Image (tube, rainbow, N blue to C red):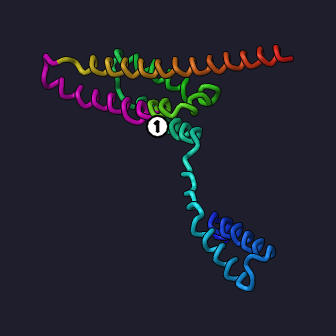
Amino acid sequence: MRYLKSRKNLTGSACGLGGLALTFAGVAGPYWPVVVAGLYGAGALIAPPERPPLPDFPDPSAQLEELRGDFGRLREYLDGVELPPAAGRLTELTELLTALLDPGWVAEVLAQDPEGVHALSRAVRQDIPEAVDTFVRTRWWTRLTPGTEPPERHLERQLTLLHEEADRLAAALREVDARRQESHTRYLEDRGRSQ
């Protein structure tokens, strides 16, 4: 059944119809079946190859839904970890990530930005858990070796950098939304002028 819809069959059939036209014009003579079959075969041979189907990529909103689930698991993990007061930056970071991942217009704009989704995914699935886990493991060792730089400083620096990255993403999304609003305003103004 797939061959009937293929380019080879369609091109061969068109060429075969051309052979029938030659037969009715009297050019093919008694060898008309050979001419029609030969033109069909030639058409099938010169037809362009079939294009492979496009890959079926997951819907960006489905990726965000998975990321929301992972973020929920990350928050449960963070609630169970004992962190120093200097890790207040983590609260700010998780609030910002919550705002970015909440369903609504931000998620709609974010779904159109694969790099932004990747950055959030990396922060939720890798950067934040690694920073906190490294702090927890290092804190125990620093008790045994006094005089070294406290792991709280490293954690605070890492969280500050992650917060700045999330802030840049939020600013980029605000800019995209502002450009979309400006574009719609220009469209309405142009439509008003043309009427």
Q: Is residue 108 above or below residue 190?
A: below
Residue extending furthest right? 195
Q: Quadrant of residue 89?
A: top left
Which residue is drawn at the image coordinates 81% and 75% (left, top)? 24
Q: Residue 53: give x, y in percent of width and height.
A: 57, 56
Left or right: 109 as drawn, with respect to 127? right
Q: Is residue 182 magenta?
A: no
Is 21 situated left or right of 63 in this image?
right
Mark 1 lies on residue: 73
Q: Can you see residue 76? A: no
Residue 86 placement: quadrant: top left
Q: Name the amino acid type tagged 1.
A: Arg
How many dots with numbers?
Answer: 1
Q: Which residues are magenta?
A: 121-148
| Image vertical order of residue 60 relative to residue 1, above or below | above
Q: Main secondary structure of the magenta part?
A: helix
**Element on which disc 1 rests:** helix
Residue 161 seen from this side: yes
Find residue 73 and report its horizontal and vertical position in percent.
Answer: 46, 37
Q: Is residue 132 magenta?
A: yes
Establish if 9 lies above or below 146: below
Residue nearest the viewer, comparing 30 with 189: 30
**In the displayed structure, does residue 121 sit left or right of residue 173?**
left
Q: Position of residue 25 (x, y in %)?
A: 80, 73
Left or right, 168 with reference to 131 = right
